[in-house]
Amino acid sequence: MKRKIVKRIVTSVLMLALVLGFAVTGSSDRVSASTKIKLSKSTIKIKAGQSKQLKLKKGKRVLRGVKWKSSNKKVATVSAKGRVAAKKTGKARITAKYKKKTYKCNVTVTSVKKNNNSEKANEETSKDDSAQTGNKGDAKKETEEQAEEQKTIKTERGSDILRIAKKNADGTTNTIYGKIYTPEAEGKSPAIILCHGYNGVNTDFVNECNYYADNGYIAYAFDFCGGSGAGRCRSTGRSTDMTITTEKEDLLAVFDHISSMDIVDENKVFVMGGSQGGLVATLATEERADKVAGMLLYFPALCIPDNWKGMYKSLDEVPAQFDFWGLMLGKGFVEDLWNMPDIFTMIGKYEGDVLIIHGDNDTIAPISYSQKAVTIYPHAKLLTLPGEIHGFTPAGQNTAKQNVLEFMDVHTGK
């Protein structure tokens, strides 16, 4: 009898040990699986000109000290931080080496379909708009549809059009016309506002807007009120009433509206400007210094106040209206600049990070102004593009927009 009892006890203990063994083994397997090292993506399909971020993770933790490499740099490159940039159609393999082990991601790059907002169209407009060359272009009359859109004094979003109401100091109202590009993402997204140059329009930045939206950012480019010639500017207002100060006020109205949108992360709104738009961006950012997540500038024309102050001996010489580089200006444009103190006393208080991208062959907005600007701002960097002029080449544009994206990714934790 005692032997049977002992035998039952031994059998029970063995079974319990066996069960516990399985339980411990299963638990161990689950812990091991959750801490397995792997790439965030094993395959990527991407269009030429776009980029994607790869991360090597152990569980939820992103690993550092990873060495990245591309098997075909002509098709796709990879940065030291794992950002894959698609160059041209083809296939490449991205490898991440960590502690003697290699992890792979297959990349397929497809071509970009041409449309009405093609790169060619963007280059043509940027030559006279962003680069301030003053090409008059075709002064087409506004269509009835455009005129009707400009009468709408309210904010609305239809397809990719976003109009923003701006109240002026004199009690009148202008309507700012722009296009918004949204990423395929749920919840709130970071945003970037892009400001065109003298005699420019929102489509000058269509390539950048598409690129940033493809990489998770809301992008909004708009027309300054009276900021370009008749038939091209779709915001209300006359060019003869436009000044640097009115453009600054336009940008402030845009910034406040974009920041308040339900789909935008109000703590991650960036401001970007090119040429005259760069000057305007520096002035507006000073007034929203605690809200701007970062400032990006393409060949900022910080020289504009100095240029105009040296153009006339007195304000009496300035005509009531005159044509300058294909755009009719009013005397107020010059008066506004004459009343400005030295530009470097007006900027520099913004304590956020600033990235200035400038070509060393720029004869319209000398790079020396940008070189001085980075000494004024507490946290500023100048990226010099060798051989580039005022208005980047396609190669320069790609370099610039990729650096802007990396800047934003760092500041948003992507």
Image (cartoon, helix red, strand yellow):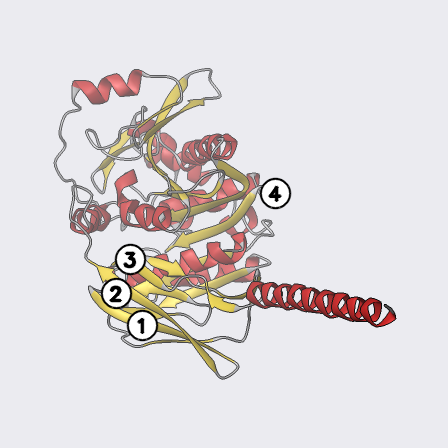
Report which residue position mark 1 lands on: 93
> What mark, if any, has residue 290 been given in the picture?
4
- In the image, is 103 to the left or to the right of 107? right
| Residue, disc 3 | 46
Could you say where residue 64 lies in the image, as x and y percent from the top left?
A: 55, 71
Percent x, y of residue 254 = 44, 32
Q: Height in image: 352 above or below 166?
A: below
Query: Who comes first in sequence, dot 3 or dot 1?
Result: 3
**Viewer-proximal residue among 357 and 305:** 357
Numbered disc in front, either 3 or 4: 3
Front disc: 1 or 4: 1
Q: Residues within 10 Å of mark 3 (few under 14, many from 20)?
A: many
Q: Residue at x 29, y 20 (%)?
A: 150
Q: Earlier in the sequence, mark 2 or mark 3?
A: 3
- Distance CA(mark 1)–CA(mark 4): 42 Å
How many discs mark residues in the rendered view? 4
Instruction: Tell me, yes or no, whether the two marked residues, 3 and 4, touch with CB atoms within 8 Å.
Output: no
Whole-number angstrom distance, CA of label 3 to CA of label 1: 13 Å
Give the distance between the C-alpha atoms of the residues marked 2 and 3, in whole angstroms: 10 Å
Q: Which mark is residue 273?
A: none
From the viewer's perspective, tell me whether residue 24 is left or right of residue 273.
right
Circle 2 residue: 87
